Structure formats: C-alpha cells, structure tokens
Amino acid sequence: MDEALGKHWILLRGLARESAHWGDFVPLLQDAFPASRISLIDLPGTGCYYRKASPCSIRAIVESVRGDALAKGWLEKPVSILGLSFGAMVAWEWLSRHPEDIAGEVLMNTSFADLSPFYMRLRRQSYRDFAELAMTRDIFRRESRIVRLVSNRKDRYEATIEEWSRIQKARPISTKNALRQIVAAATYKPSHSKPQQPVLLLNGQGDRLVSPVCSEAIHKKWRIELRAHPWAGHDLTLDDGGWVATQIQDWVFQRTSCIDREPEQL
C-alpha cells in the first residue's frame, strides 16, 4: 500500500490530550504534504468527546476511533496514521486489527508493556510530578507542570501553558477518563506479528517522561526504522515540529520513490 502512503494523514494525540494540542504542527505537516489531506481524531474522553467515557483498553479505544473514521468516510482508501505516545499505541493496535485500513504509520515516543519495564515506560524522576498532578485541581498549575514535563523548549513554556490551560478549561478531561487511559496504556501488550505496512519510529533523546530505550526496544523487536532527535522531549511536535515534518516527508519520499523507479529497473 506504499502508493497510498502520505496521501491522507490521521493524527492521534497522547495521554489526556486532544486534537487542539497539535497546535502549530498541523500547518507544518500540511506544508510538507501540500497535496495531502490531514484529519484529526479525538480519542474517547478527550476533545469533542470529553463527556464520553474512555474505555480501559487500547483495543476498545481502537474500535471507537475506527468507528469515528468510518462514519466520516475516511477509510474508503488506506490512510496513514501519525500517533504520539498513547496515540501511537492506538495506531499500532489499529494496524494489527485492521491492516486493510492502513497505508503506513509514524509512531512517536511510545512504549509497549511487554517490551519495556514500567520504570522505563514512566521514568522514575516523573513519579513525584504525577503524584502532584493527580492531587491538584488548579488547571493552570497542572498544565504548567505537564508542559515542563513533556517539553524541553523553555522559551515556549509561557505561551504553551496559557494555550493548554485554555484547552483544558474549554474541554476538560475528567480524572476518571485520565485514569482509564493510564490503565489502557499500562496494560497494553501488542501483537507480536511484524506489520506488512511501513512503520517509522521517532523519538526524542531528551524525553523525561518515557525513556528513549522504549522506542529502541520496538526498533529491535521488529527491525523498524528509528530516527532520534538529539534533544527534544516527550512532545516531539511541540519541541521541534519542523524536524518531525521533515523526517516524515523524507521517509515517505524514500518509500514512494522506490515504487516509482521499479518500472525503469525492469
């Protein structure tokens, strides 16, 4: 399905985040793929579905998200999925369960329970931050701590905290739904079959939430290409969205140009 790769992107956000958190990255991706369609889907319990209960399993979340895509007529042709962290788990399970839907995937800063231990999937230095986040009801304070945990762009902290606070006030994710997503992420064990469709892994070497070793474990398990950013944190698209868009553009070009050259080689 490489010929459909990059023609229609569906973007899936991370834990307790929604489509609006993609921010300035969407136009960057559109610039990299000017002729392509870019669609955003909120996971159940977030964004436009913030009043909806989130399932406690990745499999159930996949069926909800896929049902949304089907209802919108987005799966008439295979799509490409870009997933960040928790969204990447959803993307992988979607590929495993419904490979006919997918032309290819890009997975960023993700981890799987059966490949990496808990203390790597949630780094030790993050425990205190999560405990404090769970106890505070102050939206601005909570979002401030989240931004500082997932991003290494200190020059953008103030603007990002203000924007993320506005998002949370408009469409607040409940504590119950956040916990449901955490359970789904913590218990997710993927299929051990290597996907037939192309997959690219991206990670940030400065990730203070999930160890970069987790992406390396996926890379080694299935021999999937991995490209690493030297300093970006967990939210790769927030820290260096231009780098992410360029890596995806280059990867898609390499995959599709191989197809274009095949007739000349015969």
Image: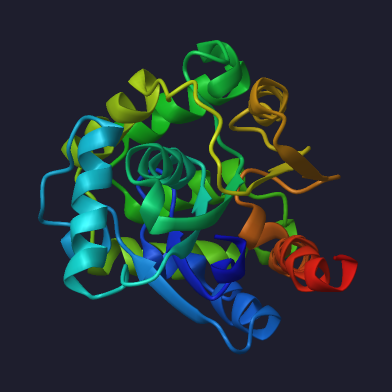
Residue in front for this viewpoint, 134 or 245: 245
> On the rendered structure, is 254 left or right of 80?
right
State the image quarter where residue 101 is shown.
Answer: bottom left
Give the quadrant of the C terminus. bottom right
Residue 44 showing in the rendered view: no
Measured as percent of width and height from the top left, residue 18 is found at 36, 60
Q: Is residue 211 left or right of residue 149?
A: right
Q: Is residue 259 above or below residue 175?
A: below
21 or 163: nearer the viewer: 21
- Location of the N terminus by quadrant is bottom right
Q: How many numbered marks, from 0 up?
A: 0
Quick one: which residue is furthest to the left in this view? Answer: 52
Residue 69, position in %: x, y?
26, 65
- The structure's colour scheme is rainbow
The x, y position of residue 95, in whole percent, is 42, 44
Identify the residue at image location x=17%, y=37%.
Answer: 55
Q: Quadrant of residue 77?
A: bottom left
Q: Position of residue 39 (x, y in %)?
A: 40, 74
Q: Nearer the viewer, residue 20 or 251?
A: 251
- Residue drawn at 75 percent across, 49 percent down: 232
Instruction: Single out the residue that lies furthest toward the bottom.
Output: 35
Position above or below: 43 against 170: above
The residue sitting at 55% across, 82% down in the picture is 36
77 on left or right of 137: right
**Is 225 rendered above or below residue 220?**
below
**In the picture, residue 237 is in which quadrant?**
bottom right
In this orientation, does residue 5 appear? yes
